[in-house]
Image (cartoon, rainbow, N blue to C red):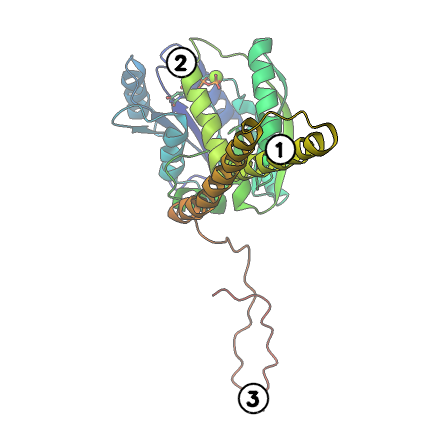
């Protein structure tokens, strides 16, 4: 198959039950679409029959491109493996393997891509999950948005369509603890949200355990926010302020009312004061750690959207005057 225009990328971990449904739906999407589509399935070290089924599909249908990881690495890494394996020339459509993200939406998302958007992300209107899970997600996304230094959209996960160039940058970002929805926002370009209703999983149990969800949330918070470190410094400042208020209050009591116990107040003041000083010191060390942390992530410093530079013309009359446009230059 010549290079496809679009890849549909889906990671799978122990999805024996959903896989046949997924394949049926994907085949229907490919049959109805006029686009040249390739399906990239990633087996994230499944322990059930998933990889056997995937092998069969890949060997019988040339449109399927299957990648098998050596062990279970987790959804975000599996997705990265799929993005790296994609040969799509135009765009990658990223979905979950349990059909919670309807693959039929490809047409709608692709239209937005054609309008010039590099990232078309799905925004969940309604979740067909327990209210507890819904509430947890909703509060997390709001919290995340309030502390993050990139504009991560509310109620959107990894379900999205990304252009070839966004996929290339994503694969080049070497950070190990990945939070793809945040990295996707960081990359920039024109991004747009499309609302959809998230379906219930077609079969089987959710593969994300509570622990994995918590780790994902941590990756979001610690990779895209300086809030935790700033919090320590803030606490230090609050503590020192409390110590000063306590001192003033004690002095007023002592000079106007004279009922202050000897020694005790001084010790308490010093304890609170130095707790504050220590917190601030920790926050200062934290600032350095933060800088080291962001540096070691090895992200590109910036992503260039476009460079416009005319070629130097040879018939220029005065070579010291440059009439050519130099709008954007990269270092
Ligand atoms: N998944 C994966 N590796 C994992 C856990 C999950 O590749 O370690 C896949 C899983 O097969 C599914 C997708 O990631 O296709 C989303 O997982 P799940 O449905 O469990 O997450 P939820 O929808 O509950 O957020
Ligand atoms: Mg799911």
Residues at circles 3 and 1 in contact by the CB criterion of under 8 Å: no
Q: Nearer the viewer, residue 97 or 220?
A: 220
Q: Element type at marker 3?
A: loop
Pick whichever of labels 2 and 1 is earlier in the sequence: 2
Q: Are marks 2 and 1 in contact (CB under 8 Å)?
A: no
Query: Measured along the vertical axis of the image, is residue 78 above or below residue 207?
Result: below
Q: Earlier in the sequence, mark 3 or mark 1?
A: 1
Which residue ends up furthest to the left in the rendered image? 70
Q: Nearer the viewer, mark 2 or mark 3?
A: 3
Query: Is 166 placed left or right of 68 in the picture?
Result: right
Q: Earlier in the sequence, mark 2 or mark 3?
A: 2
Q: Which residue is mark 3?
A: 320
Q: Quadrant of the N terminus?
A: top left
Q: Is residue 298 left or right of residue 302?
A: left
Q: Which mark is residue 20?
A: 2
Q: Is residue 70 left or right of residue 312?
A: left
| Category of crowding for the residue at label 2, using alpha-carbon neighbours closer than 10 angstroms: few (below 14), some (14–19), many (at least 20) | some
Tag in front: 3 or 1: 1
On the image, the x and y values in percent for residue 259 come to 67, 24
Rounded to the nearest whole Å, what is the CA distance between mark 2 and mark 3? 69 Å
Whether residue 189 is visible to the viewer of this picture, yes or no, is: yes
Q: Position of residue 306 (x, y in %)?
A: 55, 58
Residue reaching furthest right? 256
Residue under label 1: 242
């Amino acid at each position: 198959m010549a290079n496809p225009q679009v890849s549909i990328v889906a990671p799978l971990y122990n999805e024996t039950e959903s896989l046949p449904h997924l394949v049926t739906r994907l085949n229907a999407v490919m049959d109805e679409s006029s686009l040249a589509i390739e399906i990239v399935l990633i087996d994230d070290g499944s322990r059930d029959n998933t990889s056997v089924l995937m092998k069969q599909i890949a060997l019988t249908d040339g449109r399927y491109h299957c990648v098998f990881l050596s062990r279970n690495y987790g959804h975000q890494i599996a997705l990265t493996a799929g993005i790296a394996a994609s040969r799509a020339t135009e765009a990658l459509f990223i979905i979950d393997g349990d059909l919670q993200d309807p693959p039929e939406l490809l047409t709608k998302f692709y239209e937005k891509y054609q309008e010039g958007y590099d990232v078309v992300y799905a925004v969940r209107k309604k979740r067909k999950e327990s209210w507890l899970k819904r509430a947890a997600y909703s509060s997390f996304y709001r919290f995340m948005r309030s502390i993050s230094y990139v504009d991560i959209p509310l109620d959107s996960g990894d379900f999205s369509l990304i252009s070839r160039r966004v996929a290339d940058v994503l694969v080049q970002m070497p950070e190990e603890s990945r939070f793809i929805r945040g990295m996707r926002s960081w990359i920039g370009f024109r991004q747009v949200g499309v609302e959809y209703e998230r379906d219930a999983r077609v079969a089987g149990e959710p593969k994300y355990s509570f622990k994995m969800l918590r780790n994902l949330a941590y990756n979001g918070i610690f990779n895209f926010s300086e809030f935790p470190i700033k919090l320590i410094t803030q606490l230090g400042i609050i503590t020192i302020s409390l110590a000063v208020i306590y001192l003033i209050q004690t002095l007023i009591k002592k000079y106007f009312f004279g009922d202050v116990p000897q020694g005790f107040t001084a010790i308490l003041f010093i304890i609170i004061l130095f707790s504050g000083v220590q917190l601030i010191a920790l926050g200062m060390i934290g600032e350095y750690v933060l800088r080291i942390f962001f540096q070691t992530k090895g992200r590109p410093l910036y992503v260039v959207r476009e460079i416009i530079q005319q070629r130097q013309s040879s018939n220029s009359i005065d070579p010291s005057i440059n009439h050519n446009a130099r709008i954007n230059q990269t270092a």
